[in-house]
Each structure stands twice: as C-alpha cells, then as structure tokens.
Amino acid sequence: MKHPNPRAGILDVEPYVGGRHSIEGVEKVILLASNETPLGASQNAVKAYRNAAENMHRYCDGHAVDLRKSIGNRFCCDPARIVCGAGSDEIIQMLIRAYAGPKEELIFSKHGFSIYPIFAIGAGVTPVAAEETDLTADTEEILSKVTDRTRLVFLANPNNPTGTYITKNALAKFREKLREDILLVLDGAYAEYVTSIDYTSGIELVEQNENVVMTRTCSKIFGLAALRLGWAYCPPAVADVLNRIRSPFNVNGPAQAAGIAAMEDQAHTERSLAHNEEWLPWLSNSLTELGLKVVPSAANFVLASFGSKGVAETVYQGLLNSGIITRHMTSYHLPDCLRISVGLENDNKALVNSIKDLVGKKNG
Ligand SMILES: Cc1ncc(COP(=O)(O)O)c(C=O)c1O
C-alpha cells in the first residue's frame, strides 16, 4: 500500500527522552529528573500569567518587544540582538535549520545535550560527536573534528548531563581557533547557577564576534519550564536570520508577561541561587560519602556513577518505588549513571537516605 513517507533520515531520529513526572499509584512524587527549580516561579510571574489570561483572544506581540527589553535590562545586553523562542529548544532548532543542511555537519561533545543530534538529524545535518576529557568538553577534540562540511559547534556550558564547564579563557582561545564561517553556539541553560569567577556565559564573545551565539532559558532558575520560554543573544546578522525564519508569534502572550515579571524579580532568582549554593555541595558530598563517583557540577544537578549499569538500574527502580524520580542516563551513553536535580531540603534528604538503603542492600 502506498502511504506518505517522511524525508530521508527522519525515521533515524531517536525521539527525545524527557524526565518522568509521575509514578502510577503514587500521589506525591519527588521530582528530581528534569533540573527544574524546586522553589517554583516568582509569584509576580504567576500573577502576570493569570492577568494575561484576560487577553487570550488577542494575538500577542510577535516581536516580544517588552520581554526583550526586560531581558536586556536584566543581563545588560542589547534588546535588538535578542531573539526569543518557545524554549531554548526552539532557538536551537532554528539555528540548525538556518545554518546547516544535508551533507553538512554539526559538532557537539560526546555527552552533550541530546537535543543537538536530534534536531541535526531532523534537518538532514550530520551530528559529529567529539570525545571529552573527564566528562568535560575538550576543545582540541572538537577542533580535530572540523571539516569543510562543518557549519555549527554546540557547546552547553555548563553541560547537561555532566554539570561540567569550560573556563572563560579556554572558551576565548577556542573561538579564536575556530574557522570564522562556523557558528559557535554557547548554550547557557544553567549559566545563572555558576558562581566560579573563571566562568562566562559568553555575552562578551557574542558582542565581539560575528560567529558566536548564546542561548538561554527561563525553564531553569526562572522556574517557567511549562511556559516554554528561551532566548538567544546574537550578532545582528544572526538575529536577522532567526527573525526571518521563526514563526510570527512563537512566544505566547502569557509566557511573555510571566517572563517580564520573572526578569524583574531579582530577589526570587537570588533565593534560588542561594538554595542551590547550599544544597548542590550537600548533595555531591552526601553521595560521595556513600561511595559513589560524583562529577563536580557547576549547575543545579549532579551526575553520579554507581559503577555499573545493573546497580544504576536497581537504584533508579528502587527510588521510583520510594516515589523519587531521577534520570537514568542510558540515552547519554552513561548507563552506570543517574542524573539527580537539586531539590528541596527534605527531598534531598529523602533521596540520599533511599540511595543509602539501596546501595547498602546491594553491598550487604
Ligand atoms: C543544556 C540545555 N539546553 C537547552 C535546554 C532546553 O531548555 P528549554 O527548551 O526548556 O528552554 C535544556 C533543558 O533541559 C538543557 O539542559
């Protein structure tokens, strides 16, 4: 029988595996699977969202002018170079569609965010994985993968799921060595959590170069994951390209209103950051004390190795049985690992106690 067929390669796409949000039969689950903020959104953002519902029969501002102004104020950058998207996922997809095509290549680091190869394959672009060193992006390895066909390099900094980052100096040197016709995309989804002074999200690199774009999200520290709101800071020519191909009302009105309120509520994100600064080290240390290998993280989650795929699976399942959802890392080629988001105090403690029981049982 004849039937419509998708373009060649589309069926090679492995669908994105997101974090679970429920466990059958469990009413109150502890969600530590998707790196969301445990403190929720700013109450001002919630109010703005509710108020915006009154206007849902009207089209929103397709240029998100006020939102871009608020982002510009918050991050000291030029609103004219900001492009907003329905999550940074949409921006990532637009950048790939706009700057690469069939028979061309996109480089990412081996354990980089999985959406890069997914969107690449969907656009007919070949994703090329570069080896890492100590689960950290290795810029020399990335450079060694550059060919005539390379169009984009994606670098999540800090990276998901490893939590590792490369320094400001390393990033600047890398940019210098990268061919000028290759677009370097710095994905700063977790940038607001990083406190090290040798870190940069890359705003200045965007301002100094024609081939650097930074993407950011409101899904993490701003607590607006369900609204789908992200943004890119671009050289003017790249902003122009994204504005040509994006759908005209890609960021919905309530998301714009909530985004503006969230940007203006600095106290809320400061609380979230303070919470993370307290509980990220606590979580890392507690898991290390249980004998696990924990990758040093600059973000709001940790990657912990249980030594083998079998133990990681047993612990993952055992945690589910206790109502705790973490993220198993098989799809990231790290089958011995779980990625665990920083939660509220009681949730972090419940997690560590459950793992202690499970690992103890395994060893005993
Ligand atoms: C590194 C990284 N980039 C981008 C995203 C996408 O974020 P969103 O589409 O919610 O803005 C995520 C989400 O987990 C991420 O971890």
Image (cartoon, rainbow, N blue to C red):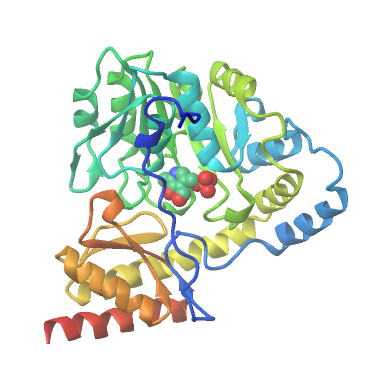
Q: Is residue 59 left or right of residue 141?
A: right
Q: Position of residue 274 (x, y in %)?
A: 49, 65
Give the quadrant of the N terminus: top left
Residue 328 falls in which quadrant of the image?
bottom left
In the displayed structure, does residue 285 sit left or right of residue 218?
A: left
Residue at image x 48%, y 34%?
A: 92
Q: In the displayed structure, does residue 183 sit left or right of residue 85? A: left
Quarter of the C terminus within the rendering: bottom left
107 or 293, which lies in front?
107
Q: Residue at x 43, y 39 (%)?
A: 187
The vertical placement of 292 against 161, above or below, is below
**29 left or right, relative to 336:** right
> How many circles with numbers are drawn on the protein?
0
Q: Position of residue 124 (x, y in %)?
A: 39, 24
Q: Nearer the viewer, residue 198 or 46?
A: 46
Could you tell me residue 324's position as x and y percent? 41, 75
Q: Is residue 141 above or below residue 34?
A: above
**Residue at horizontal 26%, vertical 74%?**
315
68, above or below 293, in the image: above
Estimate the x, y position of residue 53 in percent, counting from the top left. 82, 54
Q: Work out whether residue 190 can be spotted.
A: no
Residue 349 in sight here: yes
Quadrant of the rendered image containing residue 354: bottom left
- The part of the image, by quadrant, that contains residue 293 is bottom left
- What residue appears at the point 72 percent right and 44 percent down from the top-left corner? 256
Q: Residue furthest left?
A: 364
